[in-house]
Amino acid sequence: MKKPISSYVELFYDENVISLSKRLLNLSGLWPHNRNDVRFFFYITYVVIFTWLEIVTLLQNIHDLEKTLKNITLSFPTILIVLKAMMFRLNMHLVLPLLTVVKRDVKLGLYKSEEERRTVVWYNVAATLFSTSSVLSLFFVPTLFYAKPIVGCLLSKFNNCTLPYELPMKVNNIYEVTGVQSYALLCVYLIPASMLLTIGATGADSLLVTLTFHLCSQLSILARRARNISIEPQIYSPEMRALVERHIELLQLASILAKAFSSLMFIQTLGLIFSLCIVVYQLLMTTDSGEDINTIHFIIYSCAVVLLAFSYCFLGECLINESSEMQMACYFINWYDLPEQYTRSLIFCIARSQKPSYLTAGKFYVFSLETFGVIVKASMAYLSVLKSII
């Protein structure tokens, strides 16, 4: 007998809401409730050294267009990871009120009915799937770079395979590689790169997605409760007061969330635009040259960038829709059967919900599905400029 789909969905449900984000940020010492400056120092030192080696390699090959573009494809994301880690380190204290409310919600209960539970599970599973898929895809890309020379050697069946001591990742040699031992030491140094870069790229983003979807689920539940509220005066008054207080709290938390991640998301948006432009240009070049392995790699890379941009915009769209839903829920209450003094709270809720909550990239972009089109158009515009210049 086959299990229902809901039983498989439950496998991805996180009752504590933020477990995966907590694990990722703890590895780099950036979990707000358990900040570890020593761990963060060693983490950021390793990533900065790795980034510096990439930049040195970029400067050394500045006169070779093909090598320069390949180096930019690799070094630009790592520079963004360093900037994102520093931005989150500066603003991590702003997230503490959100984490406190999430912990309290989990303790008191996230839902009261089966319908509310489905809403919570849907958003929770969506956040978990985003985090896990981001970790796996972003871990796979640098790992592919690392494995490429070894795979190429294996494909040659070791007949004429001689290792030219070319490093798996395009970084400058710390010292001159003259033998297998020195080559192996550099390779060992680069082994943690995939894991540490993945943590830096996905840790803060995972927390953003988790907290945003948690707010979306609670706003959806709040609107459902408002729509089903009893109009009996003795019941309506205390229930409506509780709903209004909860609505104010969720809107304040959404404002804190946007403020905490605004600068980080501005950096991320610029990175997505330029990364997509450069990767698509690389893809066009490798397609024309007939390099199948590189073509597959850049297709995976470009798909990952597009999906990441779409995920952020979809995330913002969900928050806008759920924060606007309260006005419709209040409007469809049988307010005409209520005494006049009870309708004032409805008017305030409707008026406040007309200005939805949203996520921003600095003060320039509001994340929505419309913004996804703007990001893709901007990337293609830069791509056309790049093709006309080169």
Image (cartoon, rainbow, N blue to C red):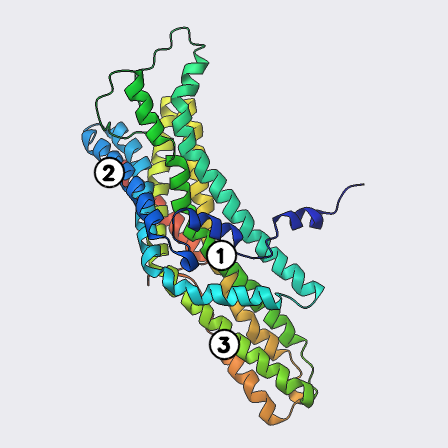
- Left or right for 341, reference 148: right
Asked if disc 1 and disc 2 are in contact, CB closer than 8 Å, the reply is no
Give the residue type that dot 1 points to: Leu
Q: Earlier in the sequence, mark 2 or mark 3?
A: 2
- Left or right for 228, reference 155: right
Furthest-bottom residue in this view: 340
Q: Earlier in the sequence, mark 1 or mark 2?
A: 2
Q: Position of residue 342 (x, y in %)?
A: 60, 90
Q: Determine crowd level at label 3: few under 14, some 14-19, many 20+ residues with C-alpha closer than 10 A.
A: few
Q: In this figure, which residue is indicated by the disc labeled 3?
A: 248
Furthest-top residue in this view: 159
Foreground of the two, 281 or 266: 266
Residue at left 47%, top 45%? Answer: 307
Give the residue type that dot 3 points to: Ile
Q: Position of residue 292 (x, y in %)?
A: 43, 23
Question: SS for tag 3?
Answer: helix
- Left or right for 55, reference 132: left
Q: In this figure, which residue is indicated by the disc labeled 1?
A: 315
Question: SS for tag 1?
Answer: helix
Image quarter of the C terminus: top left
